[in-house]
Amino acid sequence: MSFTNTGNPSLPPSLAQRAYLGVYTYTNPQGQIIPTRIRWEDGQEWEIDRVLDIRPGTARKAGGAGLRYLLRIAGQEREIFLVDGRWFAEVSLDT
Amino acid sequence: MARVILHADANGFYASVELVYRPELRGLPLSVGGDQEARHGIVLASSREAKRRGIKTGMVLWQARQLCPELVILPPNFSRYIDFSEKLRKIYQEYSPRVESYGLDECWVDISNPDVSLEDGKRLADELRRRARAELGITLSIGVSWNKIFAKLGSDYEKPDATTLISPENYKDIVWPLPAGDLLFVGPRTKPKLAKYRIYTIGDIANAPDELLSQRFGKVGRMHQCHARGMDESPVMAVGTETAIKSVGNSTTTPQDMSTIDDVRCVYTLLSESVATRLREAGLKGRCISISVRDAQLNCEACQLSIDHHTALAGEIRDVAMQLFTSRGYAHMLPLRSVGVSCSSLTSFYAPLQMDLMGKAASWEKQLKLAKSVDQIRRRYGTQIIQRGNVLANPAFSGINPHDDHVVHPVPFYAG
């Protein structure tokens, strides 16, 4: 994200980055958007086993407020976010 | 039936919203402020850490920076704040249709129902705070009471992320010791006047003899006293931030200080043009003209004057503004940093005109035709295509475009 620096002191580094995803979705009759398959930055695609939870929430490390999806992908739980019309996962920078 | 009213106030709203998008800045003193280069640079909102360092809303950015060199200043992002404000409103509206916005960051919510108690109100307030935190990442202070005034006081009482219940049992202990200025509508001008009668706290207002306040302060005095006694009965209205227009105004901080009366006249000409155009666009005209001025030390003055007819003409508004400016001796405040003019006591544009002997009405209509033609030209070719001579003569200020730059307004308390 860019912003005009108004002469700020040196700022701390981001806690995490947004890894933007391509997402195949299905809109159910209730109007909920259900992701079915995601496409990672490197082009690899993953089937979503199950959507465990959908609720409004915030990405606490990469920043942003929108919808938080808890998914099971390849047997693992994973959070992804839908914020301002784009899907992303949080990728920690400290590792 | 006793009412149950919540007043929710988003703590350091703009700053909190920025932190949701930049979590790595949490814990740092942070302010959201206007554009430094265009000199609109004042602090609009601050994080808790910045407030603790003495940063206050309205402070000029360089002053804030002097006070706290490590202050992080982010430019405002209004569309995002409006978005968050709407999301908050949607949460409130799940519990009641009676949600009244008061600016972007404050709302009253009326959840009165025969089987709802103030205690239930407190529980709902805690739930709302939890949801705001989880879903939007921001904190709320909520006051719960049986009237709007005390609910608002409650939301100011403990910050951040707290619920304060003000009930008929405890209001004398909580509200009455507070300074008189904490009461909604008791401003910096009323406070010293009250102090003259040894009225310092809200309790003093409540317990003052009825005649004293109504004689000295008229209707407003009686209103303050009702408020202090918890007798406010104004309803929570289902209104958003787009309430019926009560006044149309513009103000501007000029790129360089206004140092002469001519500079001031030039800026008032621009502002009046914008106000008049916006009045005509909204199908309105008004007869109460107010002006505000602010000098380089940020001292503010404001005054108003009602004229004998409604107008939507820039020239008339400008002349009244200048008349107010000179008659109030504001020239002594030069150089000025910003000025504003607004027009209230509005009526429909098509309300009949009082015909008078001197034929003023006829000339008014003629000028109106001219103004409307200018509106049309501007709509086609842009606001700055046609300008008044005294504005063109002053290139330092002629770039200001209040009509197109104009943004959001706070909402009146008593709508309609």
Image (spheres, helix red, strand yellow):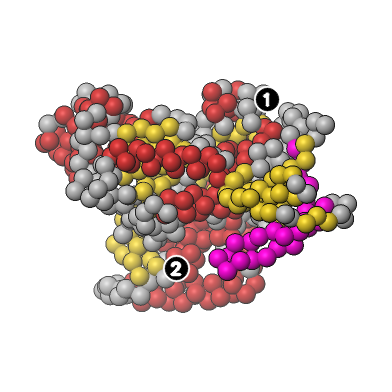
| Sequence-first disc among 2 and 1 | 1
Return the residue at label 1: B70
Amino acid residing under circle 1:
Glu
What stretch of residues is rendered in magenta?
Answer: A16-40
User: Could you tell me which residue is drawn at 76 percent across and 59 percent down?
Assistant: A37
Where does the C terminus of chain B fall, quadrant-wise?
Answer: bottom left
Amino acid residing under circle 2:
Ala
Side (left or right) of B307 relative to B263 = left
**Dot 1: element:** loop
Principal secondary structure, stretch drawn in magenta? strand
Q: Mark 2 lies on which chain?
A: B
Is the residue marked by circle 1 packed among few (<14), some (14-19), or many (20+) residues within 10 Å? Answer: some
Quarter of the image for residue B364 reads bottom left
Q: Where does the image place residue A49, in percent across and percent down from the top left?
A: 72, 54
**Dot 2: element:** loop
Question: Label for residue B282?
Answer: 2
- The answer as to whether the residues below labels 2 and 1 share one chain is yes
